[in-house]
Amino acid sequence: MDTTEYGRMVDGYTASGAVASAIALAKDLGILDILYECEEPLTSQNIADKGGLKERYVRELVSALVTGGVIQVDSTSTLFHINAEFKPVLREKSIFTRMVPYFGEKYGAIMNCCTKDGPAGVRYSEHPVLFDMMDEMRAETQDRLLDRDVLPVVPALPERLKSGIDVAEIGCASGTLILNLCARFPASRFTGSDVVESVLDIARNRASDRGISNSQFMTINVCHIPDSPKKHYDWIFLRDVVHDLPNPEGCLSGIYKMLRPGGYFSMLDFGLQGSLSDNVGNVGISYMYASSTFICIPESYQEQKSAALGPCFGVQKARALLLQAGFILVQEHHSAWNEGEVHFVCQRPE
């Protein structure tokens, strides 16, 4: 790579951040929803009228999206639309663009955390918009995740859930995944847990609104489980939690104690393959490290001795942590649709 190519690469990252911000703004203003719903192309004035917006801002914003190839325009450069086949893709992918303005919101706080004498980190609960983004992401992909990467992977899980078992989700947030399972498998009993009480209240309200009676939500300090827990579970699962914890070893030890002998544990997390140098030029991995800088490390770095793994801690480290906790690693399932996500299927020995 020469200096010209290097400069273009850096310029490309700058431009991508700007376009991502434009997508996020169009999403939050309702412009994307207007374009999803329309059957005919719309002018910027049409869009502004439908959304209660100023036309001049709308025109500039949709122009950014057109030139970025995100939405389409006719030959007169006045009629805007989204190709029908692109709509479901943009609906899902646009959720992640909200990370860019979120990084901006946390920028000053992260700068302070980075300094030697600054605070250790910034907890998720200080920026509740993150839970909103996570909830939207999970809601959009919940069925695909469960049907492709969870239920078929754990041995005999659908059959056991139908007959009735005890299940816990650690880090359930507002309950999207666990409530999906509650509705599918009414004979089983589900416990959702998170460290933020406000999101558990949302989960409880959702369960009530949907008439779901086989769930309960509580705060469980999984890193400090006694040797003889009050309750044991047949299956425990968590997604994107372990790398956000200050003490992942304590968490896995606690989950081991909470499982019945022979019970299964599902750890879904990002699985980096290879070393840092092996991934030079991989923009997806670069995004994960950047996201971790703004989100995961500030959550998990709570004191000097915190592990603060970050999502790129790698499959080898994940295997080592699971074996150290005493689990049998039954299967390592790599998602075919969510690049990088690995489902580590584990079992507590009989």
Image (cartoon, helix red, strand yellow):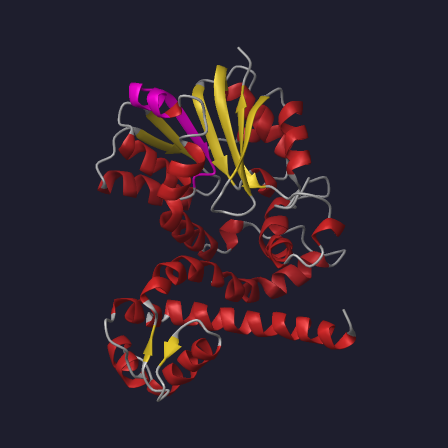
321 over 299 or under it: above or below: above
197 over 290 or under it: above or below: above
Q: x%, y% of residue 206?
A: 29, 43
In the image, 85 versus 57, the foreground residue is 85
Looking at the image, residue 92 sits to the left or right of residue 21; the answer is left
The segment highlighted magenta reads 158-172
Determine which quarter of the picture holds residue 132: bottom left
Q: How many marks?
A: 0
- Give yes or no for residue 326 being in the magenta stretch: no
Q: x%, y% of residue 178?
A: 37, 36
Looking at the image, residue 34 sits to the left or right of residue 100; the answer is left
x 64%, y 54%: residue: 289
x 62%, y 19%: residue: 326
Looking at the image, residue 276 sits to the left or right of residue 263; the answer is right
One can see residue 212 in this view: yes
In the image, 279 versus 98, the foreground residue is 279
